[in-house]
Amino acid sequence: MSAIAAMLAIGALASCDSSARTTQTTEHGTPTAIDLQAHRGGRGLTIEESLDGFAKALRLGVTTLELDIVLTADKTPLIWHDPVVLADKCTDTAPAFPDDPQFPYVGKVIHDLTYAQTQTLDCGSRTLPNFPRQQAVPGNRIATLPQLFDLVSAHGADGVRFNIETKVEADKTEQSATPQEFVDTILGAVAQAGKTDAVEIQSFDWRTLPLVRKAAPSVPLVALYDDTTFVAGSRWLGPVRYEDHPGDPLAAVRALGADIVSPGYSVPYGKKADEPGFALIADRSYVDNAHRLGLRVIPWTVNDKATIAAQIDTGVDGVITDYPDVMREVLQEKGLPLPPAYR
């Protein structure tokens, strides 16, 4: 991946100099709206992917709710990131029924558990040390996709979009449902809620995206990748061969037929704009090339103020962040439109 990193790091120094950039505008001179995506509902502020967290993001004001879907053994679409129930996020309370041989559930694969079993877990009392502002939600139960749609409707947030990730485990297939099962279940819930025009489907597993295009041609497709998935011999690239586009993720995403490219934002991942060795993947050159190919660019997951500002200055179409409140501050300081808040 070093060749890719070197290629994408060109121009990174300029992209970090926000004073050298001016606010992007439309052809009429008005500021361009930036898609503010609350990652996992804004996990920097509230327990990730909880209904409380999504509600807080709506009250704060975001463009898009970013979320993950895993499927239970009985194909319930749960809003959760991890294939395995992690002890640092969830605790057991009681078995779903007496003498359940699968109890305790912490440490188990969610795809091996039923919806009823997952609903006994407390996934809100434990906060993560890496997110010191994260508010606990004691007793939180993992929510379902229909429940989130109901929450957004109850807030009257008809303008909010949903960026839904299929958590297919391409390199550990026994830990998740198949791409087709994900697509059928998610799109079924989306159609039932009347939200087809409000969603985009994203995935690291690129097998998923052509299946979405076939079933729902109008739904935008988002190709996620990082330096562990866009590599030679990758199981994540589905119909695309890395060898046909070596070191050129944009060409690969274009060949896939996706609408949006969503890279991990830095090389190495997690660097901040004021740290030595910092470089943006989606620098100005990358973004310009993507736009020439007809691709929108929405990097993940950018959290501190200086780095969000540097990323916006490259001309990206949106930013995925754990801290939507911080990104709102940056947008306001740059004179860019703010998403409406919903009470």
Image (cartoon, rainbow, N blue to C red):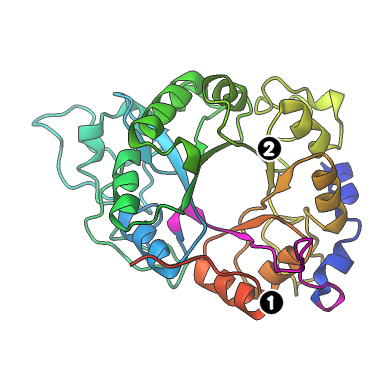
| Amino acid beneath label 1 | Lys
Q: Nearer the viewer, residue 94 or 306?
A: 306
Residue at x 41% of width, y 68% of height:
134
Q: In this picture, which residue range is highlighted in magenta?
A: 19-41
Q: Nearer the viewer, residue 137 or 22?
A: 22
Residue 107 appears in the picture as rendered: no
Q: Is residue 240 magenta?
A: no
Residue 106, image x and y in percent? 31, 42
- The answer to which quarter of the image holds residue 206 is top right
Does the magenta stretch mainly form a helix, a strand or a loop? loop
Outermost residue toward the front? 28
Tell me the residue that label 2 is attached to. Answer: 259
Residue at x 77% of width, y 60% of height:
315
Mark 1 closeness class: few <14, some 14–19, many ≥20 residues within 10 Å: some
62 vs 156, left or right, is: right
333 vs 255, left or right, is: left
Residue at x 69% of width, y 27% of height:
237
Q: Nearer the viewer, residue 118 or 49?
A: 49
Outermost residue toward the left? 98
Tell me the residue that label 1 is attached to. Answer: 334
